[in-house]
Amino acid sequence: MTTFRYSAIGSGGERLAGVMEADTQAEVIARLQRQGSMPVRAEPADKAPRWAGLVHLDLGSRRGLRKQDVADLIRELATMLSAGQDLDRALRYMQETAPVRVRPTVTGLRDAVRDGSPLSTAMARYPGSFATMHVGLVRAGEAGGNLGPTLARIADLLDRQRALAATVTSAMIYPAVLLVAMLGAVTLLLTQVLPQFVPMFEQSGVALPASTQFLVVAGAVVQADGLLILVAMLAAALVARTALRRAPVRLVVDRIVLRLPVIGDLTKEILAARFTRVLGTLLLNGVALIPALAIVRDAMGNQAARAAVERAGVTARGGGSLTPELEAANVFPPRTIHLLRLGEETAQLAAIALRAADIHEEKTRLATQRLTSLLVPAITILMGVAVGGIVASLMSAMLSLNDLASG
């Protein structure tokens, strides 16, 4: 008998962890499944001392593979399994053809599988690359005997999530570039152009307009303490980032974001797309509702949404509907609640959740375009006002000098 450490998601959605005596990893997994839990990880407790893991720590492995690498790996594996290849041969082919950064992970997966471990258990050894959701889906696919189609669904899920994130990110690039250009132009005028006129103003002795005086002082401050201001801004950003790691602070900020005009609506669409896509994929692959909600909760980046999903899971665990808590939290669009309620009433929650995900992803794309269409002209106008204001102040001061000379 061997002592195994395990982690799992219980039938009530709670996290389970402990040790179990068994002959093999497969026996541990089978026991947990008979108890109604969804195993996530099972490994020998005496495999290596904890300090040994620190000695052999590989930073690249700890960080894990990039999302694109994970999606490509799962997609290729799904393709080969669907074509009739056995798992060992598929992993051997990928081991030979995978990029250098991916090859150690594939080698580790193949070694574990050849030692008798299921693919899901092998994947659980790389938490930095494969999320709990991936492991749970693969384990469900292994139990149902449809590992190839399950892997294909995981790859589709990853591709859709990456496409959604790329849509939002790419749309924000142009406004960000405009904002940087505006700050650069204003800084250049204050530190390089304006100082050329200051000696002329001082020699004339004329009283400058208030706007010009303000710009002269601002330019002097930026020239003298610009580096210090930049360091202070970076320090403030680091402090804010540290504060946001605290759950209570993050919860307050996330709730405020959801109430903002335009941005709040976009955030709700993104959260709804993520929630419905992950939930539908899990349910479609045979994961029970309560464990699926526990996995979805961990996939939500917004603390307010996490809290709402957790409360919905508690209600569903007691036999109630999951939609009332989601509706009361006001973190998803009304469309989401309506479709989920329809899915519960018709016993088609998985299919309708995936259909809702398609709708929300399209709404996210449209909302992102709408936000960009507002930001670009707003930043352009702000840049024109800032530059025009500086130029107007300089011209006002120059006119005052001309009036003094003509008088």
Image (cartoon, rainbow, N blue to C red):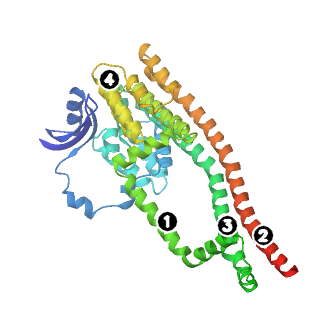
Q: Which residue is mark 1?
A: 233
Of mark 3 and mark 4, the one earlier in the sequence is 3
Counting other residues with Cα less than 10 Å from the Cα at mark 2, is it few (<14), some (14-19), or many (20 or more)? Answer: some
Q: Do labels 1 and 2 touch, CB within 8 Å?
A: no
User: Disc number at residue 316?
Assistant: 4
Position of 126 compared to 52: left or right? right
Q: Do labels 1 and 4 touch, CB within 8 Å?
A: no
Residue 223 in view here: yes
For badge 3, the amino acid type reads Val
Give me the C-alpha separation between circle 3 and circle 4.
56 Å
Give me the C-alpha separation between circle 4 and circle 2.
69 Å
- Marks 1, 4: nearer the viewer: 1
Q: Position of residue 57 (x, y in %)?
A: 31, 61
Q: Position of residue 91 (x, y in %)?
A: 41, 44
Q: Which residue is mark 3?
A: 186
Q: Which residue is mark 2?
A: 396
Q: Position of residue 69 (x, y in %)?
A: 48, 49
Give me the C-alpha separation between circle 3 and circle 1.
17 Å
- Marks 2, 3: nearer the viewer: 2
Q: Do labels 3 and 1 touch, CB within 8 Å?
A: no
Give me the C-alpha separation between circle 1 and circle 4.
46 Å
For badge 1, the amino acid type reads Met
The residue at the far top in this view is 346
Of mark 3 and mark 1, the one earlier in the sequence is 3
Residue 130 in view here: no
Q: Secondary structure at mark 2?
A: helix
For badge 2, the amino acid type reads Ser
Q: Secondary structure at mark 3?
A: helix
Give me the C-alpha separation between circle 2 and circle 3.
18 Å
- Marks 1, 2: nearer the viewer: 2
